[in-house]
Image (spheres, helix red, strand yellow):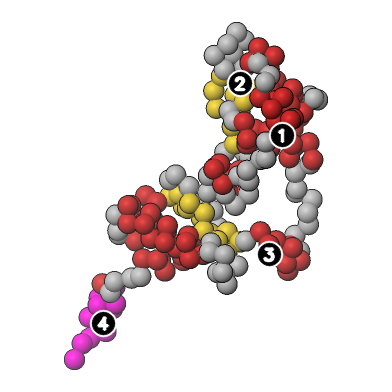
Amino acid sequence: MRTMDENNTQSEKSPINAASAIEAVLFAAGHPITYERLSRAIGIPEYEVKRIVSEMMSEYNADDSPRGIMMLMFDDSCQLCTKEEYAPIIREALGITRGGNLSASSMEVLAVIAYNQPCTRAYIDTVRGVDSGYAVSSLCEKELIAKTGRLDVPGRPILYSTTENFLRVFGLSSIDDLPKVAENKDEADTEAVTVEELI
């Protein structure tokens, strides 16, 4: 007959379901967790964590999935988040106001950067036709964009790119997941602008 201590020891040694453990950690965290940290916590190799997360993403993000959450995979981390279509219900249930939404000008700037990154502020101003200084500063403060270098031309203007936080907020795993933009005359005109005109 086993003692209580022996039963506890046996319970501690019982193998856990790695996928369930990953799900529990991500649900509790509410923000991205690195594969390295999950690997250490669960006790399996990092490549195995990525494999499991990839399989979970296929299940969570399938078009016919009944779940209200989805999996996001980044280069070095992953996260569980709610699906966009349930945002109005979540806001209503939790009493969340829409006051934190981005302004139209900030969304325009964010779109220009997302589809043309890295790019300078002068490029953004040229595409929009107005000064974008305030919107750029606001997006930097919200950590949706960041300075990622300087253009190798006279004056060395700052280059801006979107951040991992941008991907998380918009439910994207990578920039490749952005909706495709149809080619049109305006797009062709934008591409014809020279570097000298943008700095």
| Number of the front mark, 3 or 1 | 1
Residue 129: x, y in percent? 80, 25
Residue flagged by tag 4: what amino acid is it?
Asn
* Residue closer to the observer: 63 or 53: 63
Mark 4 sits on what residue? 7
Residue 185: quadrant of the picture? top right
Residue flagged by tag 1: what amino acid is it?
Asn
Q: Which residues are magenta?
A: 1-12
Q: CA distance from mark 2 to mark 3?
A: 38 Å
Residue 96: x, y in percent? 75, 60
Mark 3 sits on what residue? 86
Q: Dot 2 surroundings within 10 Å: few (below 14), some, or many (20 or more)? A: some
Residue at disc 1, secondary structure: loop
Against 20, is 80 above or below?
Answer: above
Against 32, is 119 above or below?
Answer: above
Residue flagged by tag 2: what amino acid is it?
Ile
Mark 2 sits on what residue? 158
Mark 1 sits on what residue? 184
Most common secondary structure along the magenta stretch: helix
Q: Are marks 2 and 4 in contact (CB under 8 Å)?
A: no
Query: In what quadrant of the picture does the N terminus appear?
Result: bottom left
Q: CA distance from mark 1 to mark 4?
A: 69 Å
The residue shown at (33%, 70%) is 16
Q: CA distance from mark 1 to mark 2?
A: 28 Å
Against 74, is 92 above or below?
Answer: below
Task: Identify the mark nearer the N-term, 1 or 2.
Answer: 2
